[in-house]
Amino acid sequence: MKKTLIMSLLVGASVFAADYSGVIQKPNASKLIEKDLLAPAKTFTMPAGCVTTNPESIARGAFIFHNLNGKKAKKNPPKGLSKKTADGKNKQYGNCIACHNIEGARGAGNIGPDLTGYKATFIDSGVRDNKFVFQKIADPRIDNKDTHMTVNLTTKLFTPAEICDITSYIVSPK
Amino acid sequence: MKTGIKIALSVALLSTLSFGGEQFAMSDSDRAMYAEMLENNPADIMVANGEELLAEYCGGDEGIAAFLNQSEDSLPAYLAGFPRYLPEFKQVVGIDQVLQGLMSKNGHKPFKLKSSDMFDMSAYVKSLANGEKSNIDVNANPQMKEAYALGKKTYMTERGGRGLSCNSCHSDAVIGSVLRTQPLPDLSAKGVAVAATWPAYRMTKSSLRTLQRRFQGCMKNALLKVIPIGSPEMVALEVYLTSEAKGAEIAVPGLKR
């Protein structure tokens, strides 16, 4: 091969350097993440009549505590709770037993404290009150900014009434 | 080329195996099945499919070596350093994206990143690095530095319906505790082999899956919006966790619960 030809081939190679940036998939995720971000920690006021001994409220709280979502739940939810959201989607529950043991739990985790005997140990003793439990479930970061617990009301996963149901269940005698 | 395919145990799986009792996710029959699979990883057949696809679309081992400017001898160690910044791609890329580039160069329509053919082919290519130590260099260039930082940020970002981040369940503070029957694996301790053992066969999904596909599983379970494979944040998460596993011996396909 002539020197000049080699030269021009080399030059050609660098001018037309391969560019694969247009042929690979590189979808955008930053918008998805942006819309999905957790809002700053928020303090909530417990609604009037929130914590109750009403068995229906306690039953809903228990169901939310022990189940992951409507699709996975084996039993039907108690009165006032659905397996679907208003717009027909799979309703998410608390899946609290993923991290907490409690009376009657099956396959409980131990990332969070054991909530067995909560009324006697924490409420009757005066160490905690209903307001604390409500806020802990609604947004645990107020009490512990480095918590590993889920945020349940700031994220709008639940309504205040549902947080009341869960609180009622935890502080109820079992 | 090394042909022997090593079997990798995930930390989670090991700890699951070593505990008995109802609290944990594996029953005795699961354990027996797992022992059987250790002898004979069901993913071997998928990796073999990947080898055929590589021959058909990418010119086989020689093809990928030439594409990456490597000799067949230097290829394994080079593959053990992915994800990498490659100027021809103008970004940090995973092995799957490299394969898209090579397929396109060879006149083929690239497999989708989330297709099982792509999972198989990238698993085969990564298995060429079996026995090598993971040698990713996150200080190699500004792009890699940026990817590492983005990966760490993505890992720490709390989001979704329950306000969780990857770190909520995979930080030092909770490793080893049990989340609904599953011991939480340590993903980020130095020398831990998690990133070096993917792609892997997932027994609970009966399929071969990549690391980025695994991330999507955790996102879905924990109610984080699932982000697409190949997005800068996904590649960055892979960079971050691969860097945490730097020095670990690559053993693909892994075998996971």
Image: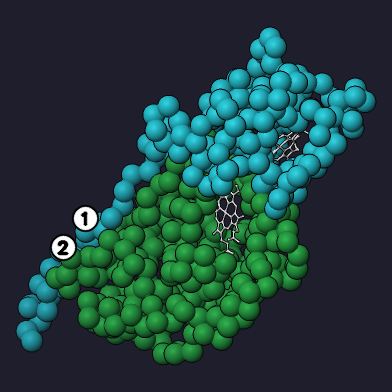
Chain colours: A cyan, B green
Residue that appears at 37% across and 60% down: B93
Residue that appears at 50% across and 36% down: A83
Mark 2 belongs to which amino acid? Val
Residue occupied by mark 1 = A22
Q: Secondary structure at mark 1?
A: loop
Tag 2, which chain? A
The count of marks equals 2
B203 or B163: nearer the eye? B203
Tag in front: 2 or 1: 1
The answer to whether marks 2 and 1 mark residues whose Cβ atoms lie closer than 8 Å is: no
Residue B197 seen from this side: no
Q: Secondary structure at mark 2?
A: helix
Is B57 left, or right, of A115 in this rendering?
Answer: left
Residue B180 seen from this side: yes
Q: Residue furthest right?
A: A125
Mark 1 belongs to which amino acid? Gly
Quadrant where the C terminus of chain B sits is bottom right
Residue occupied by mark 2 = A15
Is B43 left, or right, of B248 in this rendering?
Answer: left
At which x and y percent is residue A87? 39, 29
The answer to whether residue A71 is above or below residue B58 is above
Q: Residue furthest top?
A: A48
Dot 2 or dot 1, earlier in sequence: 2
The answer to whether residue A51 is above or below residue B107 is above
A59 or B200: nearer the eye? A59
